[in-house]
Amino acid sequence: MELLSVNVGQSRPVTYTNAPSGRTGIDKRPVDGPVRVDAPAPGGAGGVAGDAVCDLRFHGGPDRAVYAFAREDLDTWEAELGRAFAPGSFGENLTTLGLDVNNALIGERWRIGDEVVLEVTGGRIPCRTFAGFVEEDGWVRRFNGSAAGPGALLRVIVPGEVRAGDRMEIAHRPAHGITVARLHHAATADRSLLPETLVAAEWMESGLLELARTYTEKYGRKDAEDDAARDGAEHPE
């Protein structure tokens, strides 16, 4: 398992974002040399030095400090769309190789190189900015329904420096079965599964945790699917 690339993006104005600033840092490019990774303060930006985070409603902060996507999943999209996707093309900070990102458990910890330890908190919920950047029709629905998976949001447990080529290893796996892919499926396709994801509540990122708790409080843990369908609630961006 290897860190194939570290990617950062600069803030720039675009027409396809809902960010109040009208700017995005989604266009991330690989960088050479060591890059510092730190835990941002609550309400702060991302955890990767030099990377712009422009919409703090849905990105950045302690439990969404870093975003990882697998090279293998970029390859899947290349084959499906007939387009090339370089590392960073999906707005990821870390492009991995040989790591099963989407079947990582919520709360799973990854060690990168000699210093950094990151903890999985959830998967990416696609938004208008992502759809506009990729420029594919029906992108949000296609991304949510793809077997390629959403990639992993991460918090910083041990800060330090990372660089392309660093080895990666799984340092810890919690004792539950809620994976990034399963949590994403529950949030975007089958909300009746949300109550069961709360076994991973202590590790989940704030937006998905709020969604799971709100659903569970409203509908309970059983026989909720029909009520939820009638309610017509939309998943968050």
Image (cartoon, helix red, strand yellow):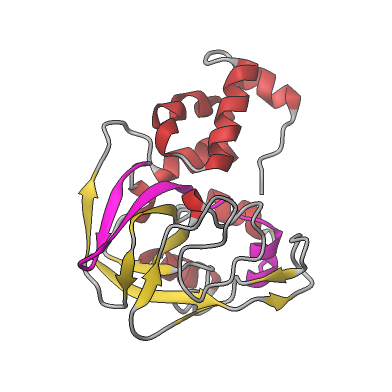
Task: Look at the image and say whether residue 116 sits in the magenta stretch.
Answer: yes
Q: Is residue 46 left or right of residue 217?
A: left
Residue furthest front in the image: 41
Residue 213 quadrant = top right
Residue drawn at 60 percent across, 70 percent down = 26
Residues 204 and 75: in front is 204
Which x, y percent locates residue 29? 50, 81
Task: Look at the image and say whether residue 233 sits in the magenta stretch.
Answer: no
Residue furthest bottom in the image: 32
Residues 23 and 122: in front is 23
Q: Quadrant of the N terminus?
A: bottom left
Q: Is residue 11 left or right of residue 111?
A: right
Residue 190 seen by the camera:
no
- Position of residue 68 relative to residue 4, above or below, is above
Residue interval drawn in magenta: 107-136
Residue drawn at 44 percent across, 31 percent down = 201
Residue drawn at 51 percent across, 40 percent down = 185
Residue drawn at 42 percent across, 53 percent down = 154
Which x, y percent locates residue 76? 43, 65
Residue 191 quadrant = top right
Residues 219 and 190: in front is 219
Residue 184 seen by the camera:
yes
